[in-house]
Image: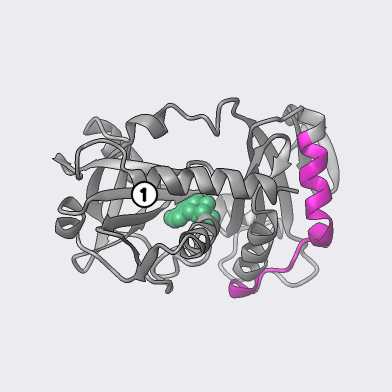
Amino acid sequence: RIVYLNGDYLPEEEAKISIFDRSFLMADGVYEVTSVLDGKLIDFAGHAKRLERSLAELDMQKPDAFDDLLEIHRELVRRNDINEGMIYLQVSRGSAGDRDFVYPDASVKPTLVLFTQNKPGLADNPKAREGFKIISIEDQRWGRRDIKTTQLLYPSMGKMMAKAAGCDDAWLVEDGHVTEGTSNNAYIVKGDTIITRHLSNDILHGITRAAVLRFAREAQMKVEERAFTIKEAQQADEAFVTSASTFVMPVVEIDGAAIGSGAPGPVAGRLRDIYLEESRKAAV
Ligand code: PLP
């Protein structure tokens, strides 16, 4: 695999960063994951914009190559011959050559890393025909989940708890209400209304979420942006999650209770089809 590190395209074995890099020592880094379909980038502009915001919220410098990110993504797609898959991008505050809680001064340049993940069959995912089984767990993450940082230990723990329970993922619950999934936004459908938590610092502002809600409204579906409980979700007609890597993924079970008919629902299916069709048309 050819990866990108601070201006160079390198075989992955040759891409090395310092042990003092702050993403390693402090999780002082932000990231984005952009999917690739038909060799093109899905929702690239949204991911670039959210990256810019994450950097600004943490007073992190933009990498010098910020304005070339589209070209770098495309070059990695070309060099690794990706038709379907993902591009992972991370910016860290870099390395000041020692460990220190205080941010280094502006002479320390951020570290910029990108790599590809080849995933043939990403769009035609058989899991979308089965749906996800979900467990609920307490949301123990920090209070700035709107910033896409590399502090992913709790989401990893959540995925492990889901796996141990024979499930696909976990929904996080705070003050009795679902915030989001470990790595996706969470939705329920009641009658003809799609319900998903409102935007705040409590959740990541999903790029797929923004697109799906726009497509839903354009298709005259009703959307309510508000918090909901696990009980309400278990009594809903449908549930689903969205993310750059799963697009729209039906949820068929929460904490052992079947949702609706227990099979992927028509609203999730329709939104998945619309999202894939429209975002493919707009891919760059
Ligand atoms: N929420 C969390 C916590 C995530 O980690 C992610 C994606 O990784 C999402 C939501 C979905 O965001 P997006 O649609 O931009 O991939």
Tell me the crowding category of disc 1: few under 14, some 14 to 19, or many 20 or more residues within 10 angstroms, Cα based: many
Q: Tell me how the rendering is colored.
A: one colour
Q: Please, is residue 105 above or below residue 32 in the view?
A: below
Q: Nearer the viewer, residue 28 or 211?
A: 211
The residue lying at 61 percent from left, 49 percent from top is 278
Q: Is residue 17 above or below residue 143?
A: above
Q: Could you tell me what secondary structure mostly forms the magenta stretch?
A: helix
Q: In the rendered structure, does residue 64 fall within the stretch colored magenta?
A: yes
Q: Is residue 60 visible?
A: yes
Q: Residue 86 location in percent, x, y?
A: 62, 39
Location of residue 78 by image quarter: top right
* Quarter location, residue 179: bottom left
Can residue 149 be seen here? The reply is: no
Image check: 113 left or right of 264?
right
Q: Is residue 54 above or below residue 262?
A: below
Q: Total marks drawn?
A: 1
Most distant residue in the front direction: 220
The residue where tag 1 is placed is: 267
Q: Is residue 215 left or right of residue 193?
A: right
Secondary element under disc 1, as helix, strand or loop, is helix
User: Which residue occupies 52% across, 55% down?
Assistant: 208
Q: Position of residue 2 (x, y in %)?
A: 77, 31
Q: Position of residue 174 (x, y in %)?
A: 25, 65
Residue 243: image location, x then y, percent = 49, 49
Give the residue drawn at x 77%, y 72%.
Answer: 106
- Is residue 70 shown in magenta? yes
Which quadrant holds residue 119?
Answer: top right
Which image quadrant: the N terminus? top right
Relative to 13, residue 43 above or below: below
Q: Which residues are magenta?
A: 56-77
Q: Residue at x 29, y 33 (%)?
A: 163
